[in-house]
Image (cartoon, coloured by chain):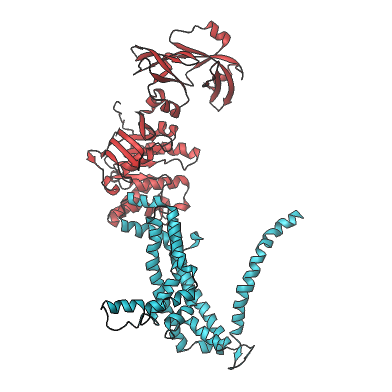
Chain colours: A red, B cyan
């Protein structure tokens, strides 16, 4: 994985120096977490650059939350080491790790006011009242809640509660901030807005943010780096663009977007300037061409094509257009057409094999065509767009 | 028809409860209130309106009896809280599985499967002059004379009350501790709170309503106590409940009624002051 560059972003409002902390990176080396004989996290090795926004993405039960809790110190590490900066933090209590966590349901103290909630961490650390007062006041101003300091959490909206939780975590100046599904308790419109605010805040503070999420849109829009996890393992690490356009496994391809996946046997792999040009034999479908790395002739593998990178053509159109040597072509029947706003989703079934395929078109483009449900069509896609999946 | 029924239905549903409430709670209390103003001359009582009974209540003897009752109340409340809170805390925070929590809570209630009087009497062979405790202490040479205060004393009364009523303290505290969102404790840890700070800043304030409810139970139960006082105090100890019972025994109903009304007022006053300090609404 290449280094991820964090570009400094001009801040709209400057964060008071008093609230800023030095960002530290986090490294995991062969980290395993076992509950009895069950391994929730298996041999994870991962580098999270200082000052980056990293999302741990995966379905529930994939080990992402456990991984985060191990970094935060709320879960013991069964095997392996975790470093924050250069310090090995195994066994160091959560309090002394210079990390802070924002909880999924915010975990605000219901009997304390907004002010007392934000003040809590500083008070527990034994800061004098005068110092605390100043810092809590500034923190509340940064999150725009100065007027709410006497309210109890129950008197706030979901978005306001979330900002209190964020303020409470940030006020202790952590070197790493962990966020456990921070947006899941908000409704859709607020989620998109808050997403932007989170990103802005992270840039302003320059802190390392590690977020756990099961939502790929959230991960794409927030992250500098995405870590896709499945069954306690890291499947792929990369920038949002890499994860989206070059998935490395069937799981990532399926989880992160609308990909059509074909499983077959590698019959030939020719080294090209862009990688390997791979020929796969897919049962009941024939030969598919794709581009990738690490292919070995004779092995079981898969390839995927994004639903929006295919071209749909009528049979007559297909006859006249030339199917080049580096193009895949299948015949399919349209089973359903679903209009979802800007995108129209077309479900098809491949002739002969019964394999289901998804095609996506921009709605304005789709409206210029006259395809009907039940019609037999041809799908073309370039080998260059078809991604080989080694795992 | 159905429209009328719809409007009447809620009233119909609350009627039985209301009737029971009126007949067995409101009416008797009103009767006691009425009787407390009746005249009484040693062998008969006549309906009247006199404040003599209340004058009879407001004496030094009654005052001292109240002081004694408050002493029992204070000691029992403190003991049930100091024993009950750790038990409830252990059950809710240190017993990992819900099944075990329920099972152990049921174990706490086992003594309550026996009648109060039998449980009180069973203390006698344990605490009496020749009882197990004295025999053991004499046998091991810790004491030379049997300890007299173990039975038929204020100590014995408080011991008996704690034994009888501690579950009323444990249950509401356990309930309020179980409701505390465990992520709050993780959050407090994350923010650097020590074990003691977590208890003081998070757990104690959030379980305060449970303490309040338990305290209300203890207050109402102990202010009216007379069985334990009689059995464990052996005639040596006095309480308002026992005073009223003695007056009823000697057929001084109006005097007993006046005493009961005063006791009711005092008990209500204590409960109101508890509620002023601690907000229990969110528990209900």
Tell me the residue at 59%/23% (across/down): A336
Question: Farthest right residue?
Answer: B1
Indicate the quadrant where residue B204 lies. bottom left
Question: Looking at this view, is B149 or A91 the one in front?
Answer: B149
Give the total of numbered labels: 0
Question: Looking at this view, is A39 or A229 the one in front?
Answer: A39
Tell me the residue at 42%/28% (across/down): A251
- Decide if residue A45 is on the left or right side of residue A153: left
Residue B268 percent across, percent down from the top left: 51, 74
- Decide if residue A376 is on the left or right side of residue A2: right
Residue B64 percent across, percent down from the top left: 43, 85
Question: Looking at this view, is A196 or B201 the one in front?
Answer: B201
Q: Look at the picture and state if B170 lies above or below A295.
A: below
- Decide if residue A386 is on the left or right side of residue A136: right
Q: Look at the picture and state if A296 lies above or below B180.
A: above
Question: Looking at this view, is A186 or B115 the one in front?
Answer: B115
- Decide if residue A26 is on the left or right side of residue A343: left
Q: Look at the picture and state if B204 lies above or below B148.
A: above
Could you tell me which quadrant the N terminus of chain B lies in? bottom right
User: From this viewpoint, is residue A154 visible?
Assistant: yes
Q: Look at the picture and state if A304 lies above or below B26.
A: above
Residue B150 percent across, percent down from the top left: 36, 80
User: From this viewpoint, is residue B278 visible?
Assistant: no
Residue B183 percent across, percent down from the top left: 40, 50
Tell me the residue at 41%/23% (across/down): A245
């Amino acid at each position: 994985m290449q280094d991820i560059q964090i570009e400094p972003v001009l801040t709209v409002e400057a964060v008071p120096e008093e609230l800023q902390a030095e960002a530290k990176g986090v490294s995991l080396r062969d980290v395993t977490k076992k509950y009895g004989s069950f391994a929730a996290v298996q041999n994870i090795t991962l580098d999270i650059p200082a000052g980056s926004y990293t999302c741990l993405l995966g379905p529930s039960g994939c080990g992402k939350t456990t991984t985060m809790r191990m970094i935060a110190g709320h879960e013991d590490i069964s095997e392996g080491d975790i470093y924050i900066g250069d310090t090995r933090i195994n066994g160091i209590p959560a309090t002394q790790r210079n990390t802070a966590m924002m909880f999924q349901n915010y975990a605000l103290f219901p009997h304390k006011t907004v002010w007392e909630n934000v003040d809590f961490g500083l008070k527990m650390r034994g800061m004098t009242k005068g110092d605390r007062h100043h810092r809590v006041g500034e923190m509340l101003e940064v999150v725009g809640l100065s007027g709410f300091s006497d309210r109890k959490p129950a008197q706030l909206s979901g978005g306001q509660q979330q900002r209190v939780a964020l303020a409470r975590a940030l006020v202790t100046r952590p070197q790493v901030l962990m966020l456990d599904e921070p947006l899941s308790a908000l409704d859709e419109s607020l989620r998109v807005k808050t997403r932007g605010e989170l990103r802005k805040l992270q840039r302003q503070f320059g802190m390392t943010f590690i977020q756990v999420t099961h939502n790929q849109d959230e991960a794409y829009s927030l992250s500098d780096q995405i870590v896709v996890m499945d069954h306690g393992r890291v499947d792929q690490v990369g920038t949002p663009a890499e994860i989206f356009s070059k998935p490395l496994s069937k799981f990532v391809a399926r989880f992160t977007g609308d990909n059509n996946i074909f499983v077959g046997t590698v019959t030939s792999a020719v080294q090209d300037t862009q990688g390997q040009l791979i020929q796969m034999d897919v049962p009941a479908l024939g030969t598919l061409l794709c581009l990738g790395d690490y292919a070995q002739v004779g092995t079981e593998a898969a390839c995927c094509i994004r639903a929006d990178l295919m071209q749909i053509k009528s049979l007559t159109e297909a006859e006249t257009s030339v199917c080049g040597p580096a193009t895949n072509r299948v015949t399919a029947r349209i089973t359903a057409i679903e209009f979802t706003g800007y995108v129209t989703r077309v479900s098809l079934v491949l002739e002969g094999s019964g394999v289901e395929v998804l095609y996506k078109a921009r709605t304005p483009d789709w409206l210029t065509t006259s395809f009907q449900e039940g019609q037999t069509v041809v799908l073309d896609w370039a080998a260059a767009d078809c991604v080989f999946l080694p795992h | 028809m159905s429209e009328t029924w719809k409007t009447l239905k809620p009233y119909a549903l609350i009627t039985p409860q209301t009737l029971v409430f009126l007949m067995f709670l409101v009416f008797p209390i009103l009767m006691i209130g009425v009787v407390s103003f009746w005249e009484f001359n040693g062998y008969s009582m006549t309906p009247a309106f006199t404040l003599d009974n209340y004058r009879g209540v407001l004496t030094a003897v009654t005052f001292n009896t109240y002081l004694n009752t408050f002493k029992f109340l204070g000691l029992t409340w403190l003991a049930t809280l100091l024993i009950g809170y750790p038990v409830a805390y252990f059950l809710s925070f240190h017993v990992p599985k819900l099944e075990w929590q329920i099972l152990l809570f049921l174990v706490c209630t086992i003594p309550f499967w026996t009648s109060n009087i039998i449980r009180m009497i069973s203390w006698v062979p344990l605490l009496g002059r020749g009882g197990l405790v004295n025999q053991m202490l004499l046998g091991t040479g810790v004491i030379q004379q049997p300890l007299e205060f173990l039975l038929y004393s204020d100590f014995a009364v408080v011991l008996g009350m704690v034994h009888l009523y501690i579950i009323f303290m444990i249950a509401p505290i356990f309930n309020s501790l179980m409701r505390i969102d465990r992520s709050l404790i993780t959050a407090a840890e994350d923010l650097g709170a020590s074990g003691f700070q977590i208890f003081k800043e998070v757990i104690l304030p959030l379980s305060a309503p449970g303490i309040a409810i338990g305290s209300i139970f203890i207050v109402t139960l102990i202010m009216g106590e007379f069985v334990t006082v009689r059995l464990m105090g052996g005639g040596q100890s006095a309480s308002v409940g026992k005073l009223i019972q003695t007056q009823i025994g000697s057929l001084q109903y109006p005097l007993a009624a006046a005493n009961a009304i005063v006791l009711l007022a005092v008990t209500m006053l204590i409960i109101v002051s508890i509620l002023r300090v601690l907000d229990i609404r969110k528990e209900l």
